[in-house]
Image (spheres, rainbow, N blue to C red):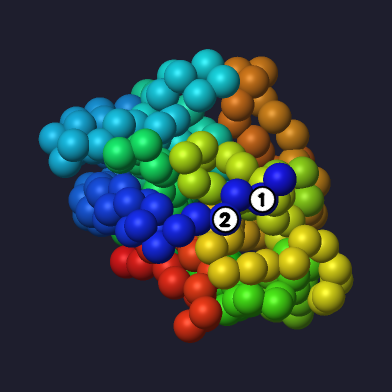
């Protein structure tokens, strides 16, 4: 069942989302050659708590960290550890915060130093696909319109869309109905109404759309080990159109 949010509840989600944004901006600044993904996790955990929030990821289905840090061929759910970033890497930073009983969730892919033109294009197209999906979060549109907007742009640019992991509704819980695939047909799926809040999160691969999960049970990587990019915004469906609660 899709849970519609009141204006007051959306405002609470926006306050949680502002913490997400503030922390992600600090992490983005810190992404330089030599830093480990665990260094980034410690920063995220400390900053979230200092700002009054709760790191939503910790303990979620047993996940051990405040941050998901996915490097290069890692698509999502990379567990921070001793991996050191190198010049030319890209890293997906995915973060959720709970505040006053509501959750904000966002992700961005950050270049480490100078990256190749091909990688920069992957990151840019993923960012553009996110924006196209977000534009579909309007009363009367359907979930399939969101997925189609993401998929059509990514595939027109020669990239592929991950099928096994999707976006989601969000509110008091990080994952609510509906699921929001990054593929689909226009005019299909659940209809969007005012008060729906979605986490739209394209995961776009440079090669095949196929992925697999590593033996840690969390880290999703591309099957062909080509690189992947990930962006995410928490978006409320309002009478005035999409309201991005995690806008940077």
Q: Secondary structure at mark 1?
A: loop
Residue 113 is labelled as: none
Residue 151's spot in the image, x, y percent? Answer: 74, 69
Tell me which corner region of the image, top left, top right, bottom left or bottom right, holds residue 149.
bottom right
The residue lying toward the viewer, choosing from 165 and 175, is: 175
If the image is split into quadrants, where does the C terminus sit?
bottom left
Q: Residue at x 35, y 57 (%)?
A: 8
Image label count? 2
Residue 212's spot in the image, x, y percent? Answer: 74, 34
If the image is split into quadrants, where does the N terminus sit?
top right
Answer yes or no: is residue 92 visible. yes
The residue lying toward the viewer, choosing from 140 and 114, is: 140
Judge from the rendering whether residue 208 lies leftward or rightward of residue 47; answer left or right: right
Residue 195's spot in the image, x, y percent? Answer: 54, 63
The residue lying toward the viewer, choosing from 86 and 232, is: 232
The residue lying toward the viewer, choosing from 59 and 101, is: 101
Vertical arrangement, residue 233 with respect to residue 98, above or below: below
Residue at the left extreme?
50
Q: Secondary structure at mark 2?
A: loop
Q: Residue at x 85, y 68 (%)?
A: 188
For mark 1, does the 10 Å Cα neighbourhood hold few (<14), some (14 to 19), or many (20 or more) residues?
A: some
Residue 2 is labelled as: 1
C-beta proximity under 8 Å, tags 1 and 2? yes
Judge from the rendering whether residue 189 lies leftward or rightward of residue 28; answer left or right: right
Vertical arrangement, residue 46 with respect to residue 235, above or below: above
Rounded to the nearest angstrom, the CA distance separating label 1 from label 2 is 6 Å
Judge from the rendering whether residue 20 lies leftward or rightward of residue 96; answer left or right: left
For mark 2, does the 10 Å Cα neighbourhood hold few (<14), some (14 to 19), or many (20 or more) residues?
A: some
Residue 157's spot in the image, x, y percent? Answer: 70, 78
- Residue assigned mark 2: 4
Answer yes or no: is residue 112 visible. no
Vertical arrangement, residue 184 with respect to residue 79, above or below: below
């Amino acid at each position: 069942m899709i849970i519609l949010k009141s204006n007051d509840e959306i405002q609470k989600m926006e306050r949680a989302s502002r913490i997400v944004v503030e922390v992600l901006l600090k992490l983005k600044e810190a992404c330089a050659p030599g830093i480990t993904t665990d260094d980034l996790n410690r920063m995220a955990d400390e900053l979230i708590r200092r700002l009054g929030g709760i790191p939503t990821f910790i303990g979620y289905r047993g996940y051990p960290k405040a941050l998901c840090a996915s490097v290069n061929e890692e698509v999502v759910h990379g567990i921070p550890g001793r991996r050191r970033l190198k010049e030319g890497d890209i890293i997906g930073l995915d973060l959720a915060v709970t505040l006053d009983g509501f959750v904000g969730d966002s992700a961005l892919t950050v270049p480490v130093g100078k990256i190749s033109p091909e990688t920069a294009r992957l990151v840019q197209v993923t960012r553009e696909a996110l924006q196209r999906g977000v534009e579909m979060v309007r009363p009367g549109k359907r979930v399939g319109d969101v997925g189609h907007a993401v998929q059509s742009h990514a595939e027109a640019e020669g990239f592929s869309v991950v099928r096994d992991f999707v976006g989601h509704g969000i509110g008091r819980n990080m994952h609510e109905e509906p699921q929001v695939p990054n593929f689909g047909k226009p005019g299909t799926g659940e209809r969007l109404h005012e008060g729906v809040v979605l986490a739209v999160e394209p995961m776009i691969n440079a090669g095949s759309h196929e992925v697999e999960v590593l033996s840690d049970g969390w880290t999703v990587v591309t099957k062909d080990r080509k690189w992947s990019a990930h962006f995410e915004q928490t978006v409320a469906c309002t009478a005035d159109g999409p309201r991005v609660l995690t806008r940077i």
